[in-house]
Amino acid sequence: MALDNLRAFIDAIERAGELRQVARPVSVDKEITEIADRCMKSPGGGPALLFRQPTLRSGGPSRYPVAVNLFGSARRMALALGVECLDEIGERIASLVNLKIPDTLLGKLAMLPQLAEVAKFPPKTAGGRPPCQAVVIRAPDVDLSQFPVPVCWPEDGGPYITLPGVITRDPGTGVRNVGMYRIQVLGKNELAMHWQRHKVGAAHWRAMAARSETMPVAIALGGDPASIYAASAPLPPTIDEFLFAGFLRREPVRLAKAVTSDLEVPAEAELVVEGYIDPREELVLEGPFGDHTGFYSLADYYPKVHVTAVTMRAEPIWPHTIVGQPPMEDYWLGHATERIFLPLLKLTIPEIVDIHMPAAGIFHNLVFVSIDKQYPGQAYKVMNGLWGQGLMSLAKVIIVFDKDVNVQDPREAWWVALNHIDPERDVRFTMGPIDVLDHSSRGFTFGSKMGIDATRKWKEEGFTREWPNRIVMDDATRQKVDAMWKELGIDLGGNGR
Ligand SMILES: Cc1cc2nc3c(=O)[nH]c(=O)nc-3n(C[C@H](O)[C@H](O)[C@H](O)COP(=O)(O)O)c2cc1C
């Protein structure tokens, strides 16, 4: 059975032994960050945390608990998506869309809604009063300072909503988008929406601005864990994330009509902030914000959201995450995307064997890819192919390896890469779009990229010397040493035999 809401997910995490409840008061003002950061840095991602008694910035007690690091381990990510192993999902999608056309990753993904297996689970709009609307507070009575919205880091511009599903609609096609974008709380009922220019929410906003139309927005907190994950997944604009979540869950996501706009919101959400953006209005200063790069994103101008209503369960739980110096919880969300999208990438770039975005590379800085090299120059074909695929276009450094390299192990990958390259010969620079959060590129969202060919070099590639073998002990000797290991009296704490 799919998990229907945040509390069912938290219960499942508790049953799995990965939840720690914190009973003592802890301030939303940076204290939650310091505690969660220590957990997220521990091996395997640390436990999920439920702060039972957060203290508001005003010093008073919060009526509502705060949950952090819910997605922050391999086990919890699999629990969220109802699988034992994340690779299962990618295989399931790939078997559905293994068709000759269209030939790009996004093109193949865009076909999903037409496939019967996916169309079985469209979101359903329920009648009656949904759980997320048990309490309805309309403007001007909304006061966001009553909620435990954390301030994450010392230089942050204010409190931030960090784990939302931001719901908008394309005014042309009517297709819905749900995106995970951080949102700064500016005051009682005003927010700053940090959707970056490459993201679908921002494209909807540009389309609304071109029409000079006011744009309704709904910000869902909580709901089923597959929908929360889907908001972070780089799906093409033609796919409704709630449909994708239904496919992941094998059960439709239940929606309800928002109370102040014609958008639909997840019926099972903990809390929904409804509002609108007036694209004719001046942008507001958002940030700085301690970001997932491990550095502060500088303050910049983003659209202002006017809150028209807050709807919620009677006793909502506030879902939260922190980003900062990696590894953090977002590594696990991104890792799920890496595993789910790999089989799809293989359909469009078939020589790809595996791909990995190590935590320190914060997704857009570093991509390791191993390939089954069959012809000279293939590493360059692969890196150029990747730079042409959706948000992969933002990757700053791509390193291509032969298929025998385990790219899931960054130590092995770096060791091989540094051995296998002649820097002048094997490194190429090109230009392209760069992630909004990159603080070093020559222009905002524009700069250079580096591709490194760390494969064995072939004669046809101009390499005429002999290429050496990797050092590996022969099986016979290993077995002999295994047999004598106990007699040797050498204790390597489980690392020997
Ligand atoms: C914890 C977390 C925070 C994020 N914050 C932002 C953000 O503030 N702005 C943004 O544009 N993308 C942010 N992202 C990345 C987007 O969620 C991601 O690119 C997603 O694919 C966007 O959805 P879209 O393709 O529908 O626009 C964040 C991702 C995670 C996991």
Image (cartoon, grey):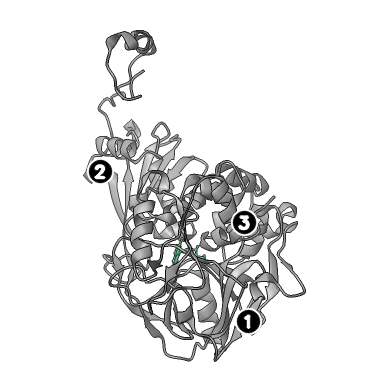
User: Pointer 3: residues within 10 angstroms few (<14), some, or many (20+)?
Assistant: some
Q: Which residue position holds label 2?
A: 425
User: Pointer 1: residues within 10 angstroms few (<14), some, or many (20+)?
Assistant: some
User: Pointer 2: residues within 10 angstroms few (<14), some, or many (20+)?
Assistant: few
Q: Which residue position holds label 3?
A: 8
Label 2 to label 3: alpha-carbon separation:
54 Å
Q: Label 2 sits on what residue type?
A: Arg
Numbered label attached to residue 324: none
Q: Residue at x 44, y 44 (%)?
A: 355
Q: Residue at x 33, y 12 (%)?
A: 485
Precedes in sequence: disc 3 or disc 1: 3
Label 3 to label 1: alpha-carbon separation:
23 Å
Marks 2 and 1: CB-CB under 8 Å?
Answer: no
Q: Is residue 140 above or below residue 69?
A: below
Q: Quadrant of the C terminus?
A: top left
Marks 3 and 1: CB-CB under 8 Å?
Answer: no
Label 2 to label 1: alpha-carbon separation:
64 Å
Q: Which residue position holds label 1?
A: 136
Precedes in sequence: disc 2 or disc 3: 3
| Residue 293 occupies quadrant | bottom left
Q: What element does badge 3 sit on?
A: helix
Q: Is 33 on the left or on the right of 251, as rendered?
A: left
Q: Give the percent coordinates (x, y) of residue 430.
A: 32, 57
Q: Nearer the viewer, residue 255 or 303?
A: 255
Q: What element does badge 2 sit on?
A: helix
Q: Give the percent coordinates (x, y) of residue 80.
A: 57, 52
Q: Is residue 49 above or below residue 174?
A: above
Q: What element does badge 1 sit on?
A: strand
Query: Is the CB atom of the residue marked by disc 2 within 8 angstroms of ligand 1's nearest atom?
Result: no
Q: Nearer the viewer, residue 362 or 481?
A: 481
Q: Nearer the viewer, residue 121 or 11?
A: 11
Q: Label 1 sits on what residue type?
A: Val
